[in-house]
Amino acid sequence: MTPAPAATLQSGVEVVTFGCRLNAYESEAIKTLARDAGLSDTVIVNTCAVTLEAERQARQAIRKLRKQRPQSRIVVTGCAAQIDPQRFAAMAEVDLVLGNVEKLDAGLYRGGLHAPAQSPRILVNDIMSVRETAGHLVPGFEGRARAFVEVQQGCDHRCTFCIIPFGRGPSRSVALGAIVDQVRALTNNGYREIVLTGVDISSFGADLPGRPSLGQMVKRLLALVRGIARLRLSSIDPAEIDSDLLRLFANEERLMPHLHLSLQSGDDMILKRMKRRHSRAQAVELCGHLRELRPDIIFGADLIAGFPTETEEMFGNTQGLIEDCGLVWLHVFPFSPRPGTPAEHMPQVQRRVIKKRAAKLRALGDLARSRYLATRVGTTAHVLIERPGFGRSEHFAPVRLAGGESAGGEPAGGKPGQIVPVTVTGIAGGELCARI
């Protein structure tokens, strides 16, 4: 996901979030901890480390925040802070650096988030030694129509381009009871759509008694919380989609017909050099099988352009994967070497070539998106309203609703958080146009 900052102000504590859905969930937990502890006049920056650009954006935001709030305390946390705490502690604007475990420690908030004298401005422990994931009941998500729920944390795999395992630690799962409690609380608070998130959610359950699979957990969750109207999964590894999950896509209407796959490349040699655990053929077969089970299912994917040693022929295999898998929603990442990863030391592709290939993938993605949207004109969709006049369909298609706001200022197309049936009337600006 392209890092995008979001800020909210609550009880004098502002939380600025970069990166993934898991960070968004944890930022809500941070707000709750800060509110319950009575903190005030504090800015907490929850960083992302997926790219160097994400870190640059975080540092830029920190400098800007200091100018805007010169008297406030600025605390930096998240993956970038976990991986390189010294770099953030060296910034004059930063008062305290917290690790990814420490940022969810209620005791630190009750203690006022003070830096220890023996280690000025840094509270970051060895995340690779962590073996448990603490459950946090989040009451809601300010400014969001859908709710995110953490079901898994960390990653045991070592893709050669990825630094995130060193920011998140080993894979560990949230117990089903805690997941049920969180989802039930959110649905009771009016959330109609839940997104299950984590670092590597397909690894869910491997560390729990009985080793339940992701599919088994989702099945039990849907059975135990009947108030779930719509359920989605965040990005998932195609190498570990279990049979129970496949059956749910076939038979459970509340599980949305939209799946985002962590594919990264369509060339077997590049996949091998990335240390991915699936082949091109396996990815194509999976998409075909899921389409047989759920004919209307739509796929998104992460793709990396210009991974080290990628030739034009190899890149062509990735281009072809878009059509072979029927991909619609693409997240395209121009490769940039992350310090501390094996890919940093591999033969690099020229930057201009990487940019050109990324542009080609995005163009193909735009074409696939346009073709898909054209097939929806004249159909009926059920749209989760995110803001007045805009929402997303079951397939995560963006939908612009006719009317926007009524004369009295009330949403003409339903209130945020509602699910409304619409008729798709056309396409404009890469979005579906619809009327209720």
Image (cartoon, grey):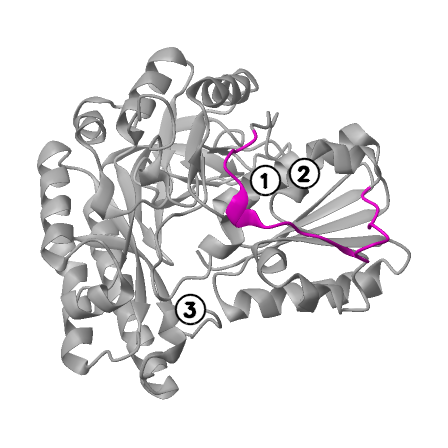
| Residue linked to disc 3 | 341
Q: Amino acid at mark 1?
A: Glu
Q: Is 51 rendered above or below residue 414?
A: below
Observer-nearest of 267 and 121: 121
Q: Helix or strand or loop: what does disc 1 sit on?
A: helix
Q: Helix or strand or loop: what does disc 2 sit on?
A: helix
| Residue linked to disc 1 | 26
How many other residues sit within 10 Å of disc 3, few (<14), some (14-19) or many (≥20)? some
Q: Is residue 378 magenta?
A: no
Q: Quadrant of residue 225?
A: top left
Q: Position of residue 96 (x, y in %)?
A: 78, 54
Q: Quadrant of residue 59?
A: bottom right
Q: Earlier in the sequence, mark 3 or mark 2?
A: 2
Q: Position of residue 269 (x, y in %)?
A: 16, 69
Q: Residue placed at 29% from the left, 20% from the top?
A: 219
Q: Position of residue 303 (x, y in %)?
A: 30, 63
Q: Nearer the viewer, mark 1 or mark 3?
A: 3
Span colored in magenta: 113-134
Q: CA distance from mark 3 to mark 2?
A: 30 Å
Q: Amino acid at mark 2?
A: Ile
Question: Magenta region's main secondary structure?
Answer: loop
Q: Is 150 rendered above or below residue 327?
A: above
Q: Is residue 124 magenta?
A: yes
The disc at residue 30 is 2
Observer-nearest of 266 and 376: 266
Q: Residue placed at 22% from the left, 25% from the top?
A: 248
Q: Are marks 1 and 2 in contact (CB under 8 Å)?
A: yes
Observer-nearest of 325 and 81: 81
